[in-house]
Image (cartoon, coloured by chain):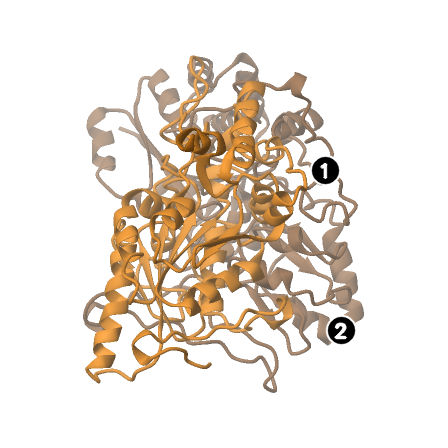
Amino acid sequence: MAHLICEVVYRGIFQKNLASRITRGIVLSARKAGKWGIAFGRYGDSPQRNGIPAKDFAIVADTQEELEQHMARYEPKELHVTICVDDTLCKGVESWAWYGLQPINRLLLPNGHLLVSSTQSAEELLKDAHKKDAPYSLWILPGKASLAGLWVYKEDHTEVRVLGALAKIAPKILSIEAVAEAIREAEWGSDLKVESARKAYERIQGRPVKITDGNPETPYSFQMPKWWEMREGVTIPSLPIGKPIEGGEGYRPERSAVFKKFSTRTMRPVIDFDTCVKCTLCWLQCPDSCFDVTPEGLYDANMEACCGCGICEAVCPVENCITMVNEAAFDDNASQWEMWRKDKGAYKAWLGAKITDKVHVGRSHGFRYRGQYEEELKAGELELGGAALASGIPGENADQKGLKPNVHEDKSSSIVTGVAEAPGG
Amino acid sequence: MAEIATFSNATQVLEPFKGVKKVTIEEYFSSGHRTCQGCESALVMKLMVKAAGPRTIVLGSTGCMYVANTTYYSTPWVVPWMHTQLGSSGSAALGTAAGLKALMKKGKMKAEPINVIAFCGDGGGADMGLGAISATLTHKEYNSLILLYDNESYANTDIQLSGSTPYGAHTTFSPPGKARRIMHTRWKKNTAGMLAAGHPECRYVATVCASYAVEMMNKVRKALSIGGPTFIHSLDPCPKGWDYDPMLSHELGELAIECGIFPLYEVEEGVVKYYGKTKAIVDGRPRKPVREYLLKQGRFAHFIEEDLEYFQGKVDEMWTKWELPGVACFKKDGARAVAG
């Protein structure tokens, strides 16, 4: 008797179809190996929101009876494999209010496996992933996070590469031959995809993670309110009004203490306070009220509230004043304004290093224009999930920023039909 | 904050913000809501109460702005907020306004003008709650504002189509297939125009877009100051349902206006006034082609040339054939035919 329980931790909506293909692929592969399986999403994650971490599960067992034993639950409590399809999730997962920040490896059994799709090294990832009181293995599938939307799928082979890697991690449950057969038969499968799965299978290497390895911080958590602490009716106090920052100047809104939202972020704004013209647009247009107004009238993005949408960069009229940088390039949520006012020279150097960071500069955030995903895949190696188009962001200030949209001028003769995929699940 | 009229119909007098630097610094809708990255509707909530000020009660019918904002035992609201049922934003606004008035008359509450705002999504407002909103807009003795935040689908339950979903859009109910490409063939309902045309005693109806934040806030302030029931329709780009990079929320709002798809206007005491980029269009500035807007969204990725042409043609009609361009769909020729 043997069974395998996997979770896929992913970015809500952006990777919803990807996660459902992976868990479905696991079950189809298991069937090819003569086993039983089921794939399901965590009910509580619905309705999903763009970027907010979500989970899908796949369970495979030798017999139907054994599978059923593991099915009757909201969410598995222990897992053999955690598949993390966006490496910035290694910083922790906060799906809802009161969840706290949950370490990526939280549900892993001792000697379990964490599979991460990433271009970072194990050392870098272990700066983010919290320490665990049991050893496990870390497997890195080289590649960028594949982010697309609800309707148009990015065919960058991530789903099959994960399946190939999983065959290496759990060969007794999923042989690579079973995986290949399942991919060939899937509606989204192809011979090229089988090849990608085999390559991932051959190349992937695991690395042991000791209990001394990992991010030593204690992730924040909450005591749920007890029923006797609750008010009559379903009422809760509203948030207090905010306060000036210092000396009666500036303004910091009071923020929810039980949902911080920063684990939603895949990019963060980096702000050049020296070039800011105090136009207020970033502050006014931020849907998450994440900007504090500083005493001198600058705007400091609060890194516990910012979810990284990038609207501030899109509306900023000054060239390179606000730049969105891959979240993987940061290790904390410190205030940029505090850093700037302590030492402006050092801040300038830090800022310059961040916005030109070649390792982490890749930015992709979903659909910008039709044909974009095809271009990305053409421009980059499929092995790494294609190239992220770093320039040509058609924001309203693209002209002023010298970032002219590169290709989305539509040529009517070359319109491709049937690009859209039916939604997964 | 002065008061106008008699106590019974008094409203707060909210002067327009004269420019972006004069906008209230305080937030009455803060961080900690579980909305999508780049959620324009969350921005609408923030700007709506920023414009309304601290003496405001907000009622929210079911939808993203209820489920995502106030998840289990948490809230981003600084002003009092209450949930109401999906189709009942109109009833909740009217009931709250009437309740406050009664309490004040009986001396159980300090007499002061308090803003009552009820919001609804397009599913709750343009579809289910239309009857209750219509009823509220006839009750001229109660001051309230109903704000429809229109993200053009039932976005909270993962994008089912509503009466507000544009032609041809990919939704859970209208996935394009190989045999049939366009599964949603209905044209979007003209909610603001319909409500303005149908309620002669409603003193203020406006359309807004949060991409033009100061104008949007000033419309809210006027709606709350003018007295009686009022209605505002806001077009909110939705990164989840429209399928686009969240950083484009602001730009797509602008494009919807510049392409003439969503006209900006206010109807004050029965007088139609276009404003912003829409006014420029009415004055003869060319509209941008709709393809610039449509092809930035995954929900239209299946469109071929003839679909783009059809869409463009329908939008052109709004501007060339309608008696009141973009506002009321009575056709010029039709009117003449009846008269003659």
Above-or-below relation of B64 to B10: above
Disc 1 and disc 2: Cα gap in Å?
36 Å
- Specify the subunit that label 1 lies on: A
Q: Which residue sits at x=66%, y=30%? A: A376
Does label 1 or label 2 sit earlier along the sequence? 2
Residue extending farthest to the front is: B340
Name the disc covering residue A405, or none. Answer: 1
- In-front residue for pair A79/B217: B217
* Residue B55 locus on image (x, y percent): 39, 75
* Residue B48 locus on image (x, y percent): 46, 62
Side of A27 relative to B265 (left or right): left
Q: Which residue sits at x=37%, y=48%? A: B195
Above-or-below relation of B261 to A225: above
The residue to which callout 2 is attached is A343
Q: Quadrant of residue B153?
A: top left
- In-front residue for pair A164/A57: A57
Above-or-below relation of A313 to B152: below
